[in-house]
């Protein structure tokens, strides 16, 4: 009887040891598999980034070649769609296209530098321009004041529609406005109640660029042209026209001279002339990359310096 009981205990111990060994082996195998997956994902991401940087180099060459021309226009080589093409012997496919951000309204321009206080304050003229763009897009003009307070240096709400800490600290969860320049138009989504529907309307004609960036009239959309012209006598001169058809096979349309030639207000005309150009400095490269069955989209902000050298100043994966 005692020997039978001892054999049963030995068998139970053996079963427990086997179960523990199996558990440990399964954990080791799982960890190794996950480590291999992480390594593969990291390698794939690195491949995608290198492919995107290769696309940046090609785009930089095209933009630098455009430097010899007096104007930057949407029918030139830099704007051509490239691909889809395979990078030889890598299995990596990419498709890329450059867009001109200088042809958009600069969201950061709603403020200006005040030399007296050393702070960035509301720019009344550019706020009016932005409000005109909002009206054209059938959006509430209150977003202009909220944007000013999001960027300006002080903590005092602008007008009746602005908002500073007292507004944002009541949100769920609470947060504060940064009171500095924005780096991407998607920051508009942080304005209380802005929402995806409004962002879908405003995203195509706007950009987040340095304060002194000017609008390229050769590539701007009709909505941006009308807002930039800011002519109270003719607020819808360009947005009702098909700019792609109007520009096809023609030089810069409209030219900077013809753009303001018939302006009804000389004072506004002088301000418009100081804010437009025919040559662009800021571009966005959208690169669609496929590595095996995995796809990435890389957005690169390219800046053409005064020496015509082009460099990437910002990159983001999958963020329009």
Image (cartoon, rainbow, N blue to C red):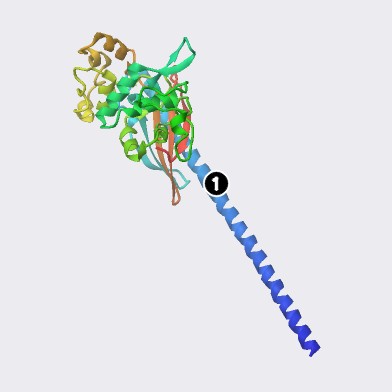
Residue 264 x, y percent position in the rendering: 20, 12
Please tell me how crowded label 1 is: few (under 14), some (14-19), or many (20+) other residues with Cα within 10 Å: few
The quarter of the picture where residue 221 lies is top left
Q: Of helix, strand and loop, which one carries label 1?
A: helix
Which quadrant of the structure image shows residue 5? bottom right
Instruction: Please provide percent x and percent y for residue 28.
Output: 65, 60
Residue 83 in sight in this render: yes
**Which residue, given by chain and number where applicable, does mark 1 sit on?**
42
Q: Is residue 146 above or below residue 5?
A: above
Question: Is 165 in front, or is 296?
Answer: 165
Q: Is residue 131 above or below residue 204?
A: above
Q: Is residue 273 left or right of residue 34?
A: left
Nearest to the observer: residue 80 or residue 295:
295
Residue 74 at x, y percent in the picture: 30, 27
Residue 212 is at least partly visible in this image = no
Left or right: 167, with 27 as reference point: left
Q: Quadrant of the C terminus?
A: top left
Give the residue at x 45% y 36%.
Answer: 170
Q: Is residue 292 above or below residue 213?
A: below
**Residue closest to the far right:** 2
Q: Residue at x 34, y 19 (%)?
A: 126
Q: In which quadrant is the N terminus drawn?
A: bottom right
Q: Nearer the viewer, residue 60 or 287?
A: 287
How far from the left and from the top, in percent, is residue 18? 69, 72
Q: Residue at x 41, y 38 (%)?
A: 287
Residue sitting nearer the eye, 6 or 167: 167
Answer with the quarter of the image where residue 159 lies. top left
């Amino acid at each position: 009887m005692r020997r039978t009981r001892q054999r049963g205990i030995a068998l139970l111990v053996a079963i427990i040891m086997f179960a523990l060994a199996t558990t440990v082996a399964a954990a080791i195998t799982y960890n190794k598999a996950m480590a291999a997956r992480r390594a593969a994902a990291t390698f794939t991401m690195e491949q995608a980034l290198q492919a995107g940087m290769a696309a940046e180099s090609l785009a930089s060459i095209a933009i630098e070649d455009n430097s010899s021309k007096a104007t930057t226009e949407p029918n030139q080589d830099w704007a051509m769609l490239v691909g889809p093409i395979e990078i030889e012997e890598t299995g990596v496919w990419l498709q890329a296209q450059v867009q001109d951000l200088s042809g958009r309204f600069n969201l950061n321009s709603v403020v200006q530098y005040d030399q007296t206080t050393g702070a960035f304050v509301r720019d009344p003229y550019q706020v009016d321009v932005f409000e005109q763009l909002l009206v054209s897009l059938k959006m509430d003009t209150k977003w202009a004041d909220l944007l000013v307070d999001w960027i300006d240096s002080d903590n005092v709400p602008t007008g009746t529609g602005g908002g500073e800490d007292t507004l944002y600290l009541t949100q769920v969860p609470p947060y504060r406005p940064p009171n500095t320049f924005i780096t991407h138009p998607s920051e508009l989504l942080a304005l209380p109640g802005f929402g995806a529907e409004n962002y879908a309307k405003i995203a195509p004609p706007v950009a987040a660029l340095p304060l002194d960036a000017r609008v390229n009239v050769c590539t701007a959309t009709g909505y941006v042209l009308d807002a930039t012209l800011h002519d109270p006598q003719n607020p819808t001169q360009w947005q009702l026209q098909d700019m792609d058809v109007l520009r096809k096979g023609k030089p810069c349309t409209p030219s900077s001279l013809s753009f303001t030639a018939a302006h009804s207000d000389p004072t506004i005309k002088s301000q418009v002339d100081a804010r437009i150009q025919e040559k662009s400095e800021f571009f966005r490269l959208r690169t669609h990359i496929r590595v095996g069955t995995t796809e990435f989209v890389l957005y690169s902000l390219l800046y053409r310096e005064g020496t015509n050298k082009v460099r990437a100043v910002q990159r983001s994966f999958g963020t329009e």
